[in-house]
Structure formats: structure tokens, C-alpha cells
Image: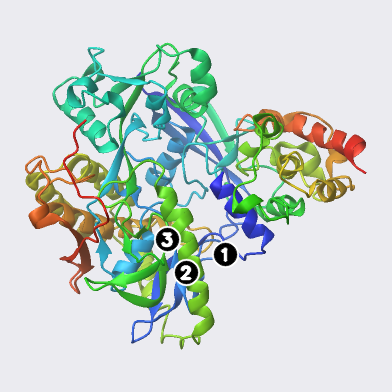
Amino acid sequence: MILQTLYQQCIKRDVRFFNEFYVTDLLRTDEGTVAGVVAYELATGEIHVFRSKAVLFATGGYGRVFSVTSNAHALTGDGPAVAYRRGIPLEDMEMYQFHPTGIYKMGILLSEAVRGEGGILRNHAGERFMERYAPTVKDLAPRDMVSRAIVAEVKEGRGIDGKDYVHLDVTHLDPEIIETKLPDVTEFARIYLGVEPTTEGVPIQPTAHYAMGGIPTNTDGQVVLGANETPVPGLYAAGECACVSVHGANRLGTNSLLDIVVFGRRGGRHMAGYAASVPLPAKPEAAADTTRAELDVLLSSNGSENVADIRSELQREMFDKAGVVRTEESLSQLQTILVGLRERYAHAVVQDKGKLFNTELMETWELGCLLDISDTLAAGALARDESRGGHFREDHPLRDDGHWLRHSLASREPDGSVRLAYKDVKMGPYVPMERKY
Amino acid sequence: MATTVEFTMKIRRYNPEVGTEPWWDEFDLEMEPNDRLLDALHEVKWHHDGTLALRRSCAHGICGSDAMLINGENALACKVLVADVAPNVTIEPIRGLPVLKDLIVDMEPFFKGYESVLPYLINDDQPPDDRERLQTPEELEKFEDTTKCILCAACTTSCPVFWSDDEYVGPAAIVNAHRFINDSRDHGAQERLRILSEKTGVFRCRTTFNCTEACPRGIKVTKAIQDVKRSILFDRF
């Protein structure tokens, strides 16, 4: 409804859209001021240079780095990846939220409302296992805890049929309530699983849902650099791609609206004021060259690596080794795997050499973004040898405020490797405490 | 999960960079019955023919980008399962809009129709005390069904009137007009009814119900169109 309303209001205000243009590069002057973006027009294959006084990225998250995700195919982290390549360190990339109730294999989200209305999670023995993990709040424990509990049940062999899923059970609820209050859930279960939720358990597993990390911004949506948070003149970000860090290491349900509605508005207002006060930066020399070179490499490759195979392997390994539960061992293995996948990516072949709607070319370019994002996520998760919010290290299960009450900042070195730095957390009125339920 | 299903998927292709005429391609696939047809199209694109062009994003019936003609009926490829349509699957682009490449059509005429009915809240009054404008559940019920539209164009491109008359605004535009005409917070009903009473508007509708059958959101599209016709006849002043 929010998306529809926003679109309607844009029509009312005659906002000009460049539909199916993919932003592939961010233009910055020698002083670092933003000068526009480069975009690839899907319909024609043309590369466009957009000059502007200010740019706001609202490009969404990067759930597609994982094999099981609630996120759309488009959510490949292009915005953060482009910023990262243009010298913007990314914040808290290891802080990723898994939602416990995704439809098995597909990751489609079954809303928290199901458990809110009384839905219960059950393992292969029909046991309400959340009673053991969170005796007081049970199935209504926070998303990260319930996700970990499901993974633990599966690991102990208590998944349904020995597989990696459990049941979300609403059969004890009034069918009338199920139909009227949970229409999406019943629809998804029936369509995608052929399961009748009023009489049988719905197969679910944790699904990659929301990036707490992203492009660092202040509360005016300005993108900021480093520990002292120096704004990049003219560059803004809002929504899931941004990291204002109102969520810290763990987002509460519905709080994504802060990123969208509150900071989207604040960013837009600040940006309008800024744009009215500065001249148009000079057009950078050879602005489209980087994009042209990137696409030429992909189009002229005579390798034989299949793009979809590389992507699937990346997503599976990320889900398995940097998902709900992580260890030093899994993350170190993952980094080696990522190096191998990047080598294969250099030999990836694009069959479609055409100009018109070359979606294969764009998917291949997006895979490059997924690889960059995965590098930053794996590096941040390996370095953070503690557990906090959405980041859980089985080998370091406790929170360690002495060392780790701080944000990570991942920057790209000239050789493509990730360099980590840290900045202090701005503390509000609340003191972090151990969560017990 | 049951065993896999083998089937042939026939896809209508078109690429103006290759030739001026469309053609048919067939792909032999083996998928799980619970796989979406979109998964089967991805299997083709990712492992058989990378040049296949289609739109998709959310893959679960929310974004509305993968409407296509599947075995002769408009549907979203992400809401149809292999088991629903195998063993013979024929896929074509939605009808009545210019095909640009394979399953991708030019959506501009569709969105032009949508924009023509003023699909946004019209109310210049200040909201009370800078708060939201309240509404009773009964007031919401009048238009709740038509808020479900995702602009996938499945209804409009299943409409025989739309196929033959490119001036007709089409079912989706009327659904979205209905959404605001019946919203107690909106003040633009008279203007929208005037627009829809013109010859490009609701009276083109021949109540074939194709639109209602095609809607992946289950909106009672034909009923909404009839509601608007009735409003023009009885409520307009």
C-alpha cells in the first residue's frame, strides 16, 4: 500500500521516471563531490550519463546474496556495491536479519502475524520446541532467536522428515480467523506448497530478510565517511540500502518504515535544500568509461562459465556459511570459496550479445555486485568474534561490549580486498543488556 | 515432495534484432511439480537460452511484472505451478500491447490509461490536526477490494475491447478509479466519473468477465466496472 501510494503521489506531482535504467556508476569530482550517475538503459542498451547536483540512492537491500530469501530478484545490492567501488566504506555489513518463517525453499515471507494470532512452531515430533528456547514468550521470541532455534532443531535431526524445515501450525485456530486475519498466509501456503493451513502444518525455514547494514548516513540521509562521519557533498541514501543504524545489529518488525518513511523524507528535504544552494558540478571526464569497460568485458568474454551456476553456488554458500549461524571455520572457508567464484566470474559468458532488453547482461553485471557485497559481509562477520543481534557466532556465542560495541566499516582496497575499520556507537538512553525470554 | 515432472515448454519469441517475424521455441524441461512456472522460465534462461527476455522481480505475486499468456490464459508466471499446467505449456506475451522482445511488452499505453483516471488521492483540505483522515471499516469495505491491484495488466490485456480499441482505458484503470471514487477521504469522484463517462471509458466494457478471471489478486474487476457505470448513471450530478 505504501509503494502504491508513493507511486500515485509521484504521478500527481508529474515526477519523471526513467524506468528500467540500471545505475552502474556514481560520478564524483576530484574533490569527492557527487556529480551524477551513469545508467544502462535496458530497452536500448545505451549508456547514459546523468549530471546532477545531488543523488539519493534508494536501491533496496541485498537479500539475493542468499539462496533462501524473501527479497525480490532485483535486490542484488547494486547501490551499496556502486558506492563501495567509489570509495564509500559500507557499515555493519555483517548485520543481516533472518526471518524465521519463510516458505520452505522459496523464502517467501509468512508474516509475524501468524504467530501473533497464535501460530505455533513444531518439529518432526510435533513438539512446540520454542518452549525450550524461550520459556516465557515461546514462539513470539525475537526473529534472530527463533531462526537460531529452527536451525538448531534441524541440526539435531528434528526437522520434518529429517529435512531443513519445521512446521508452522495454525490448525488449532478458528478457521474464520485464519481466513480473515491471515489471508496472505493461507494464499501463499495453498498456492506454493499445496498445503491447507487450516488442517496441516506449513513447512517453513528461516529466510534472509533485511540488511541492517549498508551505505552509512546521518539522520539527514547524507552519506558519511569514516569514524568522524564526514558527509559526502551531494550524496544521500535512504531505505534498506542505507545504514542510519536506528536498528543497530537487529531490526524490530515494522521498523523498516523508519528507513523508508522517516529518513526517506528527511533525506529528500535535506537534499532539496542542498541542491538549491550549490552550482552544478562540472561533468567528470570520460564519465561513462568505467561502465562501458565493465560491460564490454562481460560481452566479449570467450569463457565458458555459466552465470547462473556461479550465482547459485554463491547464494548457497552464503546461506550455509554466513547465514543464521556462523563460525570462524565456516567464514574462512567461505572467503576461499568467494575467491574461487570471483575467478570463475572473470570467465563468465553472456550468450545474448544484443542491445535490446539484454536482461542476461544485467543479471551478469548484478552478479558482480553480489560478489562485492558478499566479500564485505564475510569479512565483517569473520572479524567480529562475538554474537550480537542478527550476527551469531557459534564459536563466540556471547556479546562482547568491551571489544565490539562499535560499527564496522568495510572499504575496498585497490586490489579488491576488504579493509575493515570501526567507529563508535552513538548510545541513546538505553543500556544494552542480555536478552532473556 | 513428489518426483519430478518432464514437460515441454513452448515459448513465443520475438527479437527485432534477429528478424521481423516472431517464432516459436520449444524446451524440454524436468522440474519439480511445486516449482513455479517462473522457475521453469529461469531454467530456460539460465541453462538453455540466455537471450530469452522476460520481466520479473518479487517472484510471489506482489510486484506484478511477470504477467503472461499461459496456455491461453493471462496469469503471473510466479503464481502458476508446473503441476498446474504440465505436460504441455505454451507461453506468449500478454496481448494488446506492442511486443518489444520475447515476453516483454511496451507497458506505456497501459500506464497512460491508468494515469488518465487521476489515480491518486484528491483532497485539498488540511488533514485534521495534521493527523490521518479517519475512516470506518464500512467505508473502507466499499473500495478495499480494488486497493489490491498491482498493475500487472493481466486484466486489461485479457479484454477483447482493449485488444481492438486502443483508446479504451481498460479494466485496470477503472479498478484504480473505483478505488478512489469510493474512498470517503477523496474529493475527485466527479472528475473521474466525467473522464470515465467519455467514449474511451467504462461504457466500452462488454462484461465478458475475462478481466475478473485473469486477475491474480482475485479482484472482482467486472463488478468494479459495473459499480462505476452505476455511479455515472445515478450518483453523478
Q: Which residue is mark 2?
A: A39
Residue A317 pos. (x, y %): 21, 44
Lower position in the chain sequence, tag 3 or tag 2: 2
Residue A18 - label? 1
* Residue type marked 1: Phe
Mark 1 belongs to chain: A
Mark 3 belongs to chain: A
- In the visual, does B220 lie left or right of A372? right
Q: Quadrant of the C terminus of chain A?
A: top left
Lower position in the chain sequence, tag 3 or tag 1: 1
Q: Secondary structure at mark 2?
A: strand
Tell me the quarter of the picture where residue A428 sits.
Answer: bottom left
Residue A249 pos. (x, y %): 25, 50
Residue A238 - label? 3
Tell me the quarter of the picture where residue A80 sits.
Answer: bottom left
* Residue type marked 3: Ala
> Does any portion of residue B104 appear in the rendered image?
no
Judging depth in this view, the residue of A236 and B158 nearest the camera is: A236
Q: For the residue carrying disc 3, how many other residues have a C-alpha within 10 Å: few (<14), some (14-19), or many (20+)?
A: many
- In the visual, does A300 lie left or right of A281? left
Residue B89 pos. (x, y %): 54, 30
> Does any portion of residue B231 appear in the rendered image?
yes
- The CA span between labels 1 and 2 is 10 Å
Q: Secondary structure at mark 3?
A: loop
